[in-house]
Image (spheres, helix red, strand yellow):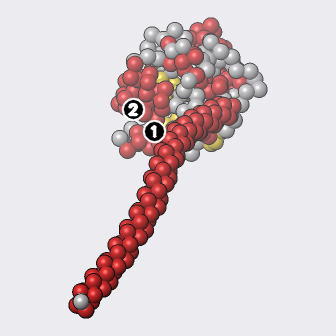
Amino acid sequence: MGVGIILTGYLGVRAWDQNQQITSLEQELRDRAALISTQARSLQSASSTISSLRDDLDQVRDDLGDLADEYRDELDRNDEFEDQLRDLAGTLDEFEKLSEIDEELLAKYSKVSFLNENYVPSSLKQIDDEWVLGRADIKDQYFHGDAMKFLEDMLERAERAGHDLRIISAYRSFDEQNELKGQFTQIYGEGANAFSADQGFSEHQLGTTVDLTIPSVGATSQTFGDTEAFEWLVENAHRYGFILSYPEDNNFYIYEPWHWRFVGRDLARDLERTDETFYERDQREINKYLLELFE
């Protein structure tokens, strides 16, 4: 009897203890389930937030892409504007440069255009005496200051090649040309028109023209055309911007192998390359070379 009571009591205690454990486990499971539910809601909320953030990020990417496109477009517009500014600046520079260049320097004279008695080149410099023919009747000679370096370079190079080129006449004023033409007319009559320009029609008044010879010839003579010095000029003068104004069979004056005019290296080289003469070119084409005349 006592053992049964004890056993019954023991089993009751065990059952109660197990019930307690079960109750505790159930509570733990409920707590865990609640925690899982809470975490699930948190995950769901986080997932929703991530999804929203991803959408926001995509929108930001799109906005950045649009901004990048706009930035590139703006850069292109700026580049285009800068190009326009450079072009405008270049154009203004050209206009300014053209405004400072004497258009008469590439005009056609020789019975074509006229220089009045008041025209004087903007810059005249005396030619060094070493390049002037040593003759009593030849006074100091002057040449356009901006073209002087080209003349000196040509004469120095000719000298190194063994040719003793000398200047007989360079710049002549309107009055000087008038006096010279009068002297020739007294001697040759109307025949002077074949080799001497009237005042205002002479290339010498521009200050960019020289009459050349060598001491053994000693004058403005067609025999200069038979010399090696003349042949050197024919082959090389264009490199220094000089042309022969009146070659054989020209329409203005007799053949003048001594008469050389500075027109700039670009024009002189182009005339040499195309085998044209200055007076065969259209004046509008010639004027395009004004900007580079002294370059």
Residue 66 location (% of width, % of height): 53, 39
Q: Residues within 10 Å of mark 2 (few under 14, many from 20)?
A: some
From what the image shows, is residue 40 above or below residue 109? below
Q: Nearer the viewer, residue 9 or 143?
A: 9
Q: Is residue 255 left or right of residue 24?
A: right
Tell me which amino acid carries mark 2: Asn
Q: Residues within 10 Å of mark 1 (few under 14, many from 20)?
A: many
- Cα distance in 3D space between marks 1 and 2: 8 Å
Tell me which amino acid carries mark 1: Met
Q: Secondary structure at mark 1?
A: helix
Q: Is residue 221 left or right of residue 82?
A: left
Residue 10 location (% of width, % of height): 28, 86
Residue that mark 2 sits on: 236
From what the image shows, is residue 250 above or below residue 78? above
Tell me which label, 1 or 2, sits earlier in the chain.
1
Q: Is residue 5 left or right of residue 174?
A: left
In the rendered image, the quadrant that contains the N terminus is bottom left
- In which quadrant of the rendered view does residue 22 lie? bottom left
Please identify the residue farthest to the right as the structure is shown.
118
From what the image shows, is residue 110 above or below residue 236? above
